[in-house]
Amino acid sequence: MTEADAANELMRLAKQIAYHNRRYHAEDTPEISDAEYDALVRRNNELEAAFPHLVRPDSPNNLVGAAVDGSGLKKITHAKRMMSLDNAFEAQDVHDFVGRVRRFLNLAPDADVALTAEDKIDGLSLSLRYEKGHLMQAATRGDGSVGEDVTANVAYISDIPQQLAGDVPDIFEIRGEVYMAKSDFAAINEAQKVKDGKLFANPRNAAAGSLRQKDAKVTASRPLRFFAHGWGEVSGLPADTQSGVMAAIAAWGVPVSPLLVRVAHSDDALAHYASIERQRADLPYDIDGVVYKVDRLDWQERLGYVAKSPRWAIAHKFPAEQAETTLELIDIQVGRTGKLTPVGRLTPVTVGGVVVSNVTLHNRDEIARLGVRPGDRIVVQRAGDVIPQIVENLTRDAERAPYAFPEQCPECGSEAVAEEGEVDVRCTGGLICPAQRVQRLIHFVSRGALDIEGLGEKTIQEFFDLGWLESPADIFRLKARRADILSRDGWQDKSVDNLLAAIEAKRAPDGAKLLFGLGIRHIGAVTARDLFKAFGTVQEVGNVGLRLAQGDEAAVADITAIDGVGGAVAEALGDFFHEPHNMSVWNDLLNEIAPPAYVSNVRESAWTGKTIVFTGKLETMSRDEAKAQAEALGAKSAGSVSAKTDLVVAGPGAGSKLKQATALGIQVIDEAEWARIVAEA
């Protein structure tokens, strides 16, 4: 790597890390996992070590937390700066830390270095200033130098005493973490669901958002807790060791971690780390590692600090992407196409900074492969830090009967079968299955289909439970229930009128969107458009479907003659129209709406027959509009980049598709250039 490359990457890393610091510390809305953040910091440190003369003034190693602008809370300057900790990720990193301590203090290579070891609470840092034992001030860490005044708020945290017990120095700042217990976090999110409030991503965000409130009454309504882990400015110390001072703090009435121990060697520290890691999933609060501190305070004084962290302490982080928990239940969900999807219900556990309580088990083959049953102890990871999955069954050898995948749909009792060559089990009940009816109704009004504003999942479920909605046609008969809707909680004249107007506006929907909205298997948005273009009207598509249902080979040929449409579509369309209840739904719907015939607006252009991919954020048009423009030029809009792609239109935030296009040498333009092409075509 050249110096220029290193300087450019250090600049990008400084900006990235500062951005994510602000999201985490100041806004309580992190966008990436702890593991991803740590990887950015490690890369920055590697480059700074290789090119020390390129270290920037805004290096992440010179900064703590994030500035506290914009919160509305009063600012407090810390009497003694609140620091952060360097990280260790491997056992060798811990041995190296102790080795550095020995060398700095000029100790013998085998000299004992006693440490304290305690679990690292995943919470919000807080400094409590006591004068003559009375709490005078509470402040968040902020950027380490200036924090936010939350004195009024901490009065409602029962773990934090207003008056310390016993003989306390005149000035003593106790520092620690405000956190929320897992059970309290789950209860708060349940309450938020009931009132359609914003859900918190994890207990740390919930604790931070609850403490940093301008209205202390909000904090009072949230069950916050506190653990002390150190101190700031003091007028005197009650002991000459870290463990001794922490014992005194506990005696004064401030909670400290029950897992705090003193160990004589780094090997003992690592053994305690392993013990805490085994307990992690079952602890009542979230942790993300273990903190080691040199126990002797005179040694701490000599070791001092570097930039933003002490030389006498280090945080040994856990691998963030995996955690151990219990599979409590296997629940079967029925989707709109009838697919039976097993979902594992877990004892909630934090994985990569997010609380995971559900995990997909995909299908019955995956359950058999893992050998999982309710009650098993499992290891969960978030694939790509997004989709939770089970990676190991720790108790698969326990003597219990294997899980029996249902042979009947749990919603309607219809037979559940897997077609030849498929692993997915599907309900054969079709539109008589309540689960499929609700999911298909939700799909029918979704953005890619009829896109009826005001008919969300909650409203559809409510109207379905009331018996007002059973089929798509019932949506267009809701106008007769205006008074009934108005009598329901949360509905006013304006909201009801807006809903009914949105429904009426879809009496003549786009035929392709209607076909897609019916949720017929294998007929996605593109295939629906191809069918509509080929047959001209939805009525003609229905006629072909009836012929397919009757085994008409000519109808199969008509379908498979359409470019990109194969036998699976013909079979699915025939199956749909073979069911009498589906025919009833179809005819009932067409009595309520009148989709216009397909009108081609395709014109010959330089892009006719070409393949175009849109990626990133489009700022002047929707993605659907851009795709329609491409089709109007005779081009095909694709969702992925390949060697067959002719053009990529890249907006802000374009990622892997842009990289792939560049690697393949495909022409890339921005949105403005695309608009010029459309205007000139």
Image (spheres, grey):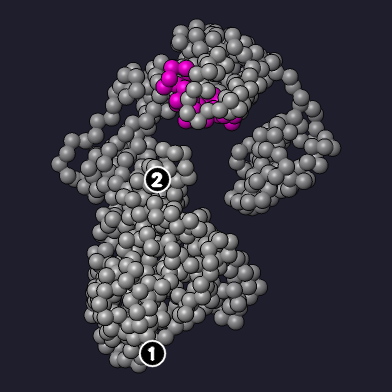
Dot 1: within a 10 Å radius of its alpha carbon, few (fewer than 14), some, or many (20 or more) residues?
few
Whole-percent x, y for residue 454 in the image = 57, 29
Is 24 rendered above or below residue 271? above
Q: Please check the rendered image and state whether residue 119 is part of the magenta-colored stretch, yes or no.
A: no
Left or right of 608 in this view: 656: left
Q: Nearer the viewer, residue 344 or 53?
A: 344
In the foreground, 220 or 127: 220
Q: Residue at x 29, y 23 (%)?
A: 407
Q: Position of residue 262 (x, y in %)?
A: 24, 76
Instruction: Estimate the x, y position of residue 550 in percent, counting from the top left.
Output: 50, 6
Kind of residue at badge 2: Asn
> In the image, 296: left or right of 338?
left
In the figure, is residue 285 to the left or right of 204? left
Residue at numbered disc 2: 189
Residue drawn at x 53%, y 76% is 62
Q: Which mark is residue 13?
A: none
Secondary structure at badge 2 equals helix
Image quadrant holding the C terminus, namely top right
Residue 94: tell me if it is visible: no
Farthest residue, direction left: 399
Location of residue 227 with respect to 560 vertically, above or below: below
Q: Quarter holding the N terminus?
A: bottom right
